[in-house]
Image (tube, rainbow, N blue to C red):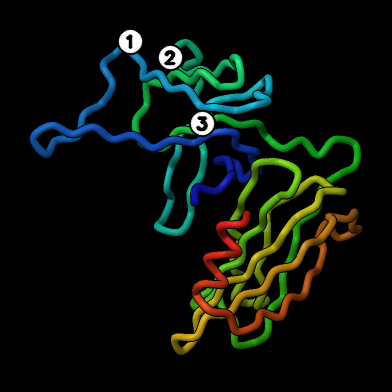
Amino acid sequence: IRMGVSSDNILLSNEAAIFTRFTQYQRELSVRNGSSLRFSFPEPQPRQGLSMYEGSSVSSFRHHWDPLTDSLLNSIYPANQSYQVGTNKTGWVAAGTVLNPGSSGEVSLSVALPSNYTNANSLVYLVSEQMPLVQALQGDQAQRRFRSGLLPVNQSIRLIVLSKQDNIYFMGTQTVITQPSSTGVQQVNIIPVISSLQQVNAMLDGL
């Protein structure tokens, strides 16, 4: 999963993402200068005002999206139930919009789990139920919590906890509405339960 986080840690709502790589004789190729790759993504209700981003992995667990400033060779246009995308980049490329908190403000979600759940054996994701957004929460070992980036308030967010301990799977889900907070942080407690791998896969398939 490539998360919707920009290089300055602002959440993005990504409409489309694609990964390309071309090789010849085991040598990786790039797009010729002045040329671009062209793609079409089906979308029944395409949105206006999207921007292009290039994927950048800062570690094996963190992935950012950096803005592509060359708009002549990196563009996205809504068409008849589709997006028409052009890019001169290989690797991960996405099209999306920066989340605008508007006048209602923004808040970060802080998820507390039982003490046996750590950032070494557990993952916490948020999935927006109102926009195309998935984000992995960052583990805070000192506080024993997982924390999200800033989210607009009054948004329906589904939190998903996945953990594997002693070859046993645990899963927890909870839907919350982001609320204004004087501290800028909304606290959430989740207690996962033992789950089969089939149950985990069924939940993920249903997202």
- According to the image, label 1 marks what residue? 34
At label 3, the amino acid type is Tyr
Among the two numbered marks 1 and 3 on one chain, the one whose residue lies closer to the N terminus:
1
Q: Residue furthest left?
A: 25
Q: In this view, does 8 lie above or below 145?
A: above
Q: Is residue 206 left or right of residue 156?
A: left
What is the tally of numbered marks visible in this picture?
A: 3
Residue pictured at 43% horizontal, 42% vertical: 56
Cβ atoms at labels 2 and 3 below 8 Å apart = no
Which of the two discs, 1 and 2, labels the residue nearer the N terminus?
1
Name the amino acid, label 1. Answer: Gly
At a point 68% along the width and 24% down the height, the residue shown is: 47
3D distance between C-alphas at marks 2 and 3 = 12 Å
Residue shown at 65%/78% (left/top)? 144
Q: Where is residue 99 in the image (x, y as percent from the top left)?
A: 72, 37
Residue placed most toward the observer, 130 or 184? 130
Q: Quadrant of residue 7?
A: top right
Q: Where is residue 63 in the image (x, y as percent from the top left)?
A: 48, 49
Pointer 2: residues within 10 angstroms few (<14), some, or many (20+)? some
Label 2 sits on what residue type? Leu
Q: What element carries label 2?
A: loop
Instruction: Say which residue label 2 marks.
Output: 73
> Who comes first in sequence, dot 2 or dot 3?
3
